[in-house]
Image (cartoon, rainbow, N blue to C red):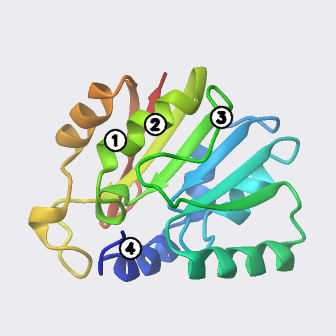
Amino acid sequence: MPSKLNKDSFSAAKRLDIYHITSLLPAMPYHQVADIGCGEGALSVPLGKLVYRGNVIALDPVKKNLTITRRELRKARLTNVKTSHISEEPTLPLKDEMLDGAMAVFPFQLFSKPQQTFKDVNRCMTKGGWLAVIEWQPAFEEYGPANKQKVAPDVLRGKIEKVGFKFYIRHDLSDMAYMMIFSK
């Protein structure tokens, strides 16, 4: 189940430049994308607009977050984004090879078994699909999790490569966060 850090992570996700992030993603308008650990939908709405001919599945282990996400989707009048509860972490309620892309923001603070969750993301991903992971910068200390709970870029790369993805590129989004993109 999610930890106390989620509140910091979700409010931090809102501080990121979402449109800068979406501009860096290798997403196409027809892609099927998952927003894993969607929180309150800060990224689900822009992803829904980005893949306007495709679909987004917003997944979160906290039902209250999904309620807020649904409200934001109604305000934006997006019908191509569906929400789903992750009840049995690390297993995702998705079919094999159905995703063209996936996004995860601060997953190592959100999930109790993040590596197993990413292994399941790999199961759901089509060949050539992409995975974007946003994590805390190790040197950032204004707020967020303790330094020992932050994942350094080289460690993140090793963990994601271990479950079957290939490193593609890293972007420093701000002093607070960085994003790494992987492919299957």
Q: Name the residue under label 4.
A: 9
Instruction: Answer left or right for 54 relative to 128.
Output: right
Q: In this view, does 93 lie to the left or right of 98?
A: left
Q: Residue at x 75, y 74 (%)?
A: 70
Q: Along the polypeptide, which appears first: circle 2 or circle 3?
A: 3
Residue matched to label 1:
116
Which amino acid, mark 3? Lys
User: Eyeballing the image, is 86 above or below 14?
Assistant: above
Q: Does residue 180 appear left or right of residue 132 in this picture? A: left
Distance, label 4 to label 2, CA atoms, is 22 Å
Q: Which SS class for mark 4?
A: helix
* Lower position in the chain sequence, tag 3 or tag 1: 3
Q: Are marks 2 and 1 in contact (CB under 8 Å)?
A: yes
Q: Residue furthest front?
A: 88
Amino acid marked by disc 2: Asp
Marks 3 and 1 close (CB-CB < 8 Å)? no
**Of callouts 1 and 4, the N-terminal one:** 4
What is the three-letter code of the residue carrying label 4?
Ser
| Residue furthest left in the image | 148
Report if the CB atoms under discs 2 and 3 are less than 8 Å apart: no
Query: Would you name the residue on which mark 3 appears?
Result: 95
3 or 4: mark nearer the eye: 3
Task: Identify which residue, 168 or 75, lies in the foreground.
Answer: 75
Q: In this view, does 46 lie to the left or right of 141?
A: right
Q: Which mark is residue 120?
A: 2
